[in-house]
């Protein structure tokens, strides 16, 4: 491909609203162009990379025996209303309306295709002999993000690979799940993207378990916790650290003893005024969970994680106000605790796993200006459930003693075990060998293809531009022609490389070498060949990897091998 | 691919609403499935053919140096309002709305992308040195057809290849137009589709000229006129036939003479009562065209073509009522004519080209019960314009004397010369070599890809099913295994053919041979191999083309060559 015959509108400056490196490079390198908020046109370079990424996805799906189809973007409201998530999904769905539409029922633009594919299976598969089946597509999705940002990371129109498995039993569904899980590992590895695989909550999809494939990214929508060696990774909602030992013994202590703590309302106050280390205190918080007051206990030096509270299954929760707390417990924040008769004023008591079994703790007495000492968690507080509830902090040791990293992350893939929620709602039944009818066991599996493309850029760039992994680079080789008199040789080399199946871009523009070199760094083609008069007279062309500092002079006859070598190492 | 591992839900009966053969076969052969009116899911067989067709389109576009991009379906209303066709397009456009959308301006789903691509060029191209450029995409389009019908022929969501050329001058634009025109010829030829290329009106697109690539099809939206040998093709609006000579001489005749024709109100009446052959009469019709009475004259044995009247440029027209006619001419239909003072009651007089220069004709006298004879068109009637206005009938001779066919047809491709309408409205300007700014000259070019796929089926089927042209067949070879004991050999042959790059489907289902053979005819794979005990014992397998009556026994070692031979001939 000749640069002069395609459309690569590189930019010196990125638009001001491009907040992260990959978004800026997406626009500056001429991969894509914004049409509206969260809506992008893919230009030739971006489209070439997108197609290469799609091909990797397709090859791995096919290898895992998933069956490719293409479902429509338009989906009837009638079908959605039969499914289990219409209410929840409506907030982000586009409605497709027009003058003639009213009479016929409403239509939506699909954010995913559980309803459509389950309806398809209900209509086309009826026997256990036709199962298992995993159906997939690579297709354009629509989601009306209230605040689309960061380029393709949070877009309104985007390409997704979505797959759905249908099985005769839960254990068969687990096999299908594992096949997709492994396919996802291969896809991201082939695309040059290092992902963290974390067990995740299932949220609105309502499955029984799931894994997220995430990429650390400063603007990610969620936080993940992991060790650098990859031995541990979890969402912030599930992450646990190694409990830090307390200095004081945890042996049986005397009965709780109330003592006056006038003016003390914080963990630090109590440490300063009475010498009670934060780790020997119980921090007591009250939340209204589905309108009922619930108590949350964590160690004084820990923070309650609202992300973990969110996993308890309440439809909504919020911190109780001081007035609501006083009404329930007769004391104000700073003097609260779980000792004594707190029910039924408090509906449930949750305590962090790190304080389970602890003795000799100090906590508020539910009387302003008083605390208890010698508190035993097991003996003195009616805890309903111990579970991980505290925040994990960056740098804390993992259970295995390795430093934990807490980073924002962006999800590029997700595998869900769905169960029979959709198949029951939409009548996707099969007959077993005895002629008995059962709902199919389902899984669903998504990869944000356009998001993954940008995540690759986020993970592979430097100050000068993109550094494409060869597998998804728009071209393998860029030939920069700096002396127009050598155009004929440049074209010969271009054709030679193309004939050897190396996608080759020839920068034949009448621009200054400096402009061409800057653009070359920006668009990040893995192998660069420069054809100029000096090296030509010296007997060849200059060749270098995108990341190499020095060029190597190779004779023209050796260029093909040199390209092959550099690509094999990139 | 094993049949048992994919999804090919063949149907014995097509749904009742499938009105044409290709629509029925689309559903019966398990290529696609209806989700809603005009909205289809592509199943594996259909998707494979669609991808093969897309690849042909892509290869020919690339060969013509068109540049592939991918523009979004979502398009901002703000941009459409700047363009020249928002009012006209709104009737068929889907609006994409949601709760959060109101604040940000409205969005539409693109039926085509003139506005988006012109805006793209305005932003990225500024110099004559960057032109010409032809931009294309293969992308999903949306159109809210009031009455979607005939499967993919008139769908609400469909795949289209749309291309747009940008040039520095009208003559350069003509070169770009011709390149697309030729690419279209190659695309349809490679896809096995015989198309008629007709010069067409430009309609709402407003270009200066255009060609339609059409396929005869009983449910087509327009009529075309053509000779079987392909030497002549035109839309019904443009078609002309060879004038049929009149029996009477056309030499100068005496002055018009009024004669009484009591009770005569039709062409047939006058023939019967006064022996005036229909071809010697002038048929006079009055229409209100943009509210003004206009007169249309055709020969008595011809019919006025309203399709041709529609090309005169009136915003609206309709036959005048007898009352309106009497008010204008003082006579009723049956006694009307163009002789004498008819203006200003009649605004304009249009006469069919076939009566230009005719003499000795008979026409109404604008007095009930009276006609004129000896009428000379040139001398006695103030015709404003002679032009083709009559209907062309199936079987009439063409200008070259070959029989004309009049058929309904469906448009699969369209090339338009657009001019500067969009570039002026949307500011797509370039600087010429003197630094002067001009709007770019544009063309636009569309292929309905999914519609073309169904048109191929419409053109290639028999009573038993589809007969795929090899280039777009979902598979090249179907192996029908009729004895399960030979499964191992069937799989070996399948793998051998796949390794030789023949897309091969192995029907390994535990079904009766009769069911398999019926399905084989239905899905229409070009080459069929049957592996059964009888032929195996006879030393090989049976092979036949989809359309052949007889199978040939070939030794297994010769199967590959036999497949190659049959495909080369298909």
Image: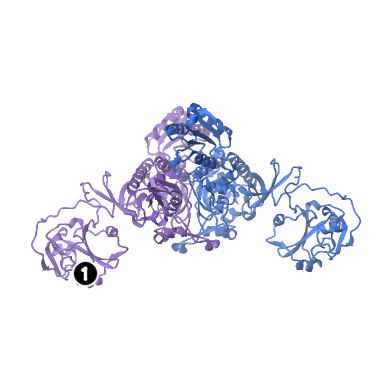
Chain colours: A purple, B blue
Question: In which chain is the residue bearing label 1?
Answer: A
Residue A5 visible in the shown view: no
- Residue carrying label 1: A344
Residue at image location 17% in from the left, 53% down from the top: A244
Horizontal relation, residue B456 to residue A567: left or right: right
Q: Nearer the viewer, residue B338 or A247?
A: B338
Where in the figure is residue B228, as x and y percent of width and height? Answer: 69, 42
Q: Nearer the viewer, residue A83 or A449?
A: A83
Estimate how packed mark 1 is, as few (under 14), some (14 to 19) or many (20 or more) residues with alpha carbons within 10 Å. Answer: few
Residue at image location 40% in from the left, 57% down from the top: A425
Secondary structure type for disc 1: loop
Where in the figure is residue B177, as x and y percent of width and height? Answer: 62, 45
Residue A561 lies in quadrant: top left
Residue that sits furthest to the left in the current view: A254
Residue A326 lies in quadrant: bottom left
Where in the figure is residue A352, as x and y percent of width and height? Answer: 21, 58
Where in the figure is residue A71, as x and y percent of width and height? Answer: 47, 50
Q: How many marks?
A: 1
- Please identify the quadrant where the C terminus of chain B is shown: top right
- B168 to A506, vertically: above or below: below
- Please identify the quadrant where the N terminus of chain B is shown: top left
Q: Nearer the viewer, residue A415 or B198?
A: A415
């Amino acid at each position: 491909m000749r640069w002069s015959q395609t459309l690569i509108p590189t930019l010196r400056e990125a638009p001001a609203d491009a907040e992260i490196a990959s978004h800026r490079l997406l626009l500056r390198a001429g991969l894509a162009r914004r049409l509206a908020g969260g809506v992008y046109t893919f230009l030739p370079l971006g489209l070439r990379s997108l197609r290469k990424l799609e091909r990797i996805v397709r090859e791995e799906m096919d290898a895992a025996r998933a069956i490719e189809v293409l479902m429509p973007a338009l989906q009837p409201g009638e079908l959605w209303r039969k499914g289990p998530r219409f209410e929840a999904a409506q907030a982000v769905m586009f409605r497709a309306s027009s003058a003639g539409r009213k009479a016929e029922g409403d239509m939506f633009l699909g954010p995913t295709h559980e309803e459509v594919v389950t309806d398809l299976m209900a209509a086309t598969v009826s026997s256990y002999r036709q199962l298992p089946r995993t159906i997939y597509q690579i297709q354009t999705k629509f989601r009306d993000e209230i605040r689309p940002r960061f380029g393709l990371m949070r877009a309104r129109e985007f390409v997704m690979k979505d797959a759905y498995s249908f099985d005769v039993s839960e254990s068969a569904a687990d096999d299908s799940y594992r096949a997709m899980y492994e396919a996802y590992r291969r896809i991201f590895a082939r695309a040059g993207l290092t992902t963290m695989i974390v067990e995740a909550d299932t949220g609105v999809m309502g499955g029984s378990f799931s894994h997220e494939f995430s990429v650390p990214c400063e603007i990610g929508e969620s936080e993940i916790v992991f060790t650098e060696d990859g031995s541990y990774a979890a969402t912030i909602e599930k992450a646990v650290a190694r409990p830090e030992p307390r200095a004081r013994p945890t042996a049986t202590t005397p009965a709780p003893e109330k003592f006056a703590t006038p003016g003390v309302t914080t963990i630090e106050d109590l440490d300063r005024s009475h010498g009670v280390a934060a780790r020997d205190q119980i921090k007591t918080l009250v939340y209204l969970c589905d309108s009922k007051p619930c108590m949350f206990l964590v160690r004084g030096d820990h923070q309650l994680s609202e992300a973990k509270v969110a996993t308890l299954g309440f439809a909504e929760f919020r911190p109780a106000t001081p007035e609501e707390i006083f009404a329930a417990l007769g004391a104000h924040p700073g003097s609260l605790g779980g000792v004594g008769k707190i029910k039924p004023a408090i509906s449930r008591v949750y305590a962090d796993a790190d304080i389970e079994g602890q003795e000799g703790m100090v906590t508020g007495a539910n009387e302003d200006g008083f605390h208890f000492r010698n508190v035993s968690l097991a003996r003195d507080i009616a805890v309903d459930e111990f579970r991980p509830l505290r925040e994990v902090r960056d740098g804390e040791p993992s259970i295995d003693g390795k430093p934990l990293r807490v980073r924002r992350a962006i999800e590029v893939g997700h595998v869900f075990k769905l169960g029979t929620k959709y198949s029951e709602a939409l009548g996707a039944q099969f007959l077993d060998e005895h002629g008995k009818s059962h709902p199919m066991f389902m899984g669903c599996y998504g990869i944000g293809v356009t998001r993954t493309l940008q995540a690759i850029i986020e993970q592979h760039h430097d100050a000068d531009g993109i550094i494409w992994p060869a597998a998804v680079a728009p071209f393998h080789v860029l030939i920069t022609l700096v002396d127009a008199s050598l155009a004929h040789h440049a074209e010969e080399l271009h054709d030679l490389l193309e004939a050897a199946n190396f996608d080759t871009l020839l920068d034949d523009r009448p621009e200054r070498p400096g402009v061409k070199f800057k653009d070359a760094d920006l668009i990040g083609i893995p192998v660069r060949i420069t054809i100029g008069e000096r090296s030509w007279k010296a007997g060849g062309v200059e060749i270098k990897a995108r990341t190499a500092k020095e060029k190597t002079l190779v004779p023209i006859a050796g260029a093909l091998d040199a390209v092959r070598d550099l690509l094999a190492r990139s």
